[in-house]
């Protein structure tokens, strides 16, 4: 049990706390997790930990560290414990109402910027479906202040979270609304790019019982049709909301690239291709829209 490794009545140094990574055997990044929990308790950065390893924790600092270490040892996601996660160099508030932003989703941002590179200095309308924390929408808005970025999510709690993140970051070129995919979008509205990181995990996938996803809402993870239902719906409906020359970009599971490419080709998208994530797995498939709902 965390807290049992040290005498509760003895003074505890930073170095002693940093030696307790063994209490997080189920974490893939135990040392980093430990450092971040200690930074949270001390209100210091990671460099400070190694500059002052002999510093002693106060009683309140140690209590905070022991409590958060115990929560992490029980498997609770680090982002939920700390209440924030960095994405695209943006510090985002995170809670249990939505998915925790993951580094591989930055590929969705990168690919969108690449697809619209020639229009970078022109006003563009972007729609982010299933926006969650607002991570993708806010990353795009931060890179292109002249773009208007709209995020939609079916969860009122997630939309409130995204709104808080946007307000705190001062990204006034964003707006967030509650809706089930396109239900919040006026039929006459058109976008230069539609991006989405929808649910794409099959309901019987064993990974649902492992790691951080155990603490995340199933509605944001699981889709029917072996994980393809939401991807199929978005790809079909997006044709009615894209301008000619616009782009659809979809994040998906690492084994779904081929079927999503086939889907986009069958629906009449052009220049269909897939980008790999930082682990060299197929992660984002995109296609251009020439016009017409097919």
Image (tube, rainbow, N blue to C red):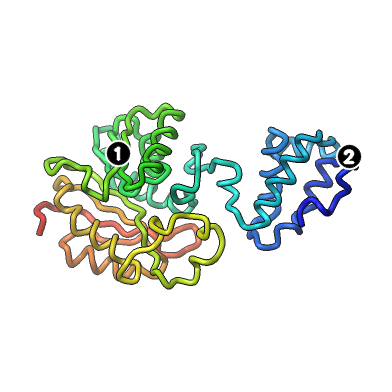
Q: Which residue is mark 2?
A: 11
Give how far across and how far down residue 191 sits, in percent. Answer: 21, 42
Q: Sort mark 1 into few (<14), some (14-19) or many (20+) by Cα contacts within 10 Å.
A: many
* Residue at 18 percent of width and 55 percent of height: 237
Question: Which quadrant of the view contains residue 37?
Answer: top right
- Secondary element at image label 1: strand
Asked if the residue at tag 1 contacts the one at tag 2, i.e. Cβ–Cβ closer than 8 Å, the answer is no
What is the CA distance from the residue labelled 2 to the residue labelled 1? 50 Å
* Residue at 50 percent of width and 59 percent of height: 213
- Secondary element at image label 2: loop
User: If the image is split into quadrants, where does the C terminus sit?
Assistant: bottom left
Between 140 and 180, the one nearer to me in the picture: 180
* Residue at 39 percent of width and 29 percent of height: 171
In the image: residue 104, left or right of residue 260: right
* Residue at 30 percent of width and 70 percent of height: 225
Between 143 and 165, the one nearer to me in the picture: 165
Circle on res. 34: none
Give how far across and how far down residue 266 sits, in percent. Answer: 18, 67
Give how far across and how far down residue 202 sits, in percent. Answer: 39, 69
Give the total of numbered labels. 2
Q: Which residue is mark 1?
A: 177
Q: Considering only order in the chain, which callout, 1 or 2, is on the residue closer to the N terminus?
A: 2
User: If the image is split into quadrants, where does the N terminus sit?
Assistant: bottom right
Q: Sort mark 2 into few (<14), some (14-19) or many (20+) by Cα contacts within 10 Å.
A: some
Relative to 283, does residue 33 appear above or below in the rendering? Answer: above
Between 207 and 10, the one nearer to me in the picture: 10
Give how far across and how far down residue 184 sits, in percent. Answer: 22, 43
In the image: residue 53, left or right of residue 106: right
């Amino acid at each position: 049990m965390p807290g049992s490794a040290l005498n509760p009545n003895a003074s505890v140094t930073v170095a002693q706390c940093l030696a307790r990574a063994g209490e997080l055997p189920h974490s893939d990044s135990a040392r980093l997790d430990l450092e971040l929990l200690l930074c949270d308790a001390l209100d210091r950065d990671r460099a400070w930990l190694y500059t002052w390893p002999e510093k002693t924790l106060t009683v309140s600092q140690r209590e905070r560290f022991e409590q958060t270490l115990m929560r992490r040892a029980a498997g609770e996601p680090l982002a939920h414990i700390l209440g924030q996660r960095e994405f695209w160099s943006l510090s985002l508030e995170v809670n249990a109402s939505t998915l925790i932003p993951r580094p591989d989703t930055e590929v969705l941002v990168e690919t969108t910027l690449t697809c619209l590179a020639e229009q970078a200095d022109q006003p563009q309308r972007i729609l982010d479906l299933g926006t969650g924390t607002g991570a993708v929408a806010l990353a795009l808005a931060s890179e292109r202040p002249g773009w208007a970025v709209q995020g939609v999510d079916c969860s009122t709690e997630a939309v409130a979270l995204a709104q808080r993140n946007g307000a705190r970051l001062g990204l006034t070129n964003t707006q967030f609304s509650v809706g089930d995919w396109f239900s919040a979008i006026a039929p006459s509205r058109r976008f230069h790019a539609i991006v989405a990181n929808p649910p794409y995990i099959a309901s019987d996938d064993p990974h649902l019982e492992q790691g951080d996803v155990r603490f995340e809402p199933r509605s944001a993870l699981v889709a029917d049709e072996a994980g393809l239902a939401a991807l199929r719906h978005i790809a079909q409906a997006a044709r009615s909301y894209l301008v000619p020359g616009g782009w659809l970009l979809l994040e998906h599971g690492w084994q779904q690239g081929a079927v999503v490419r086939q889907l986009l080709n069958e629906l009449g998208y052009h220049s269909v291709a897939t980008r790999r994530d930082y682990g060299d797995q197929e992660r984002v498939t995109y296609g251009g829209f020439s016009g017409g709902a097919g």
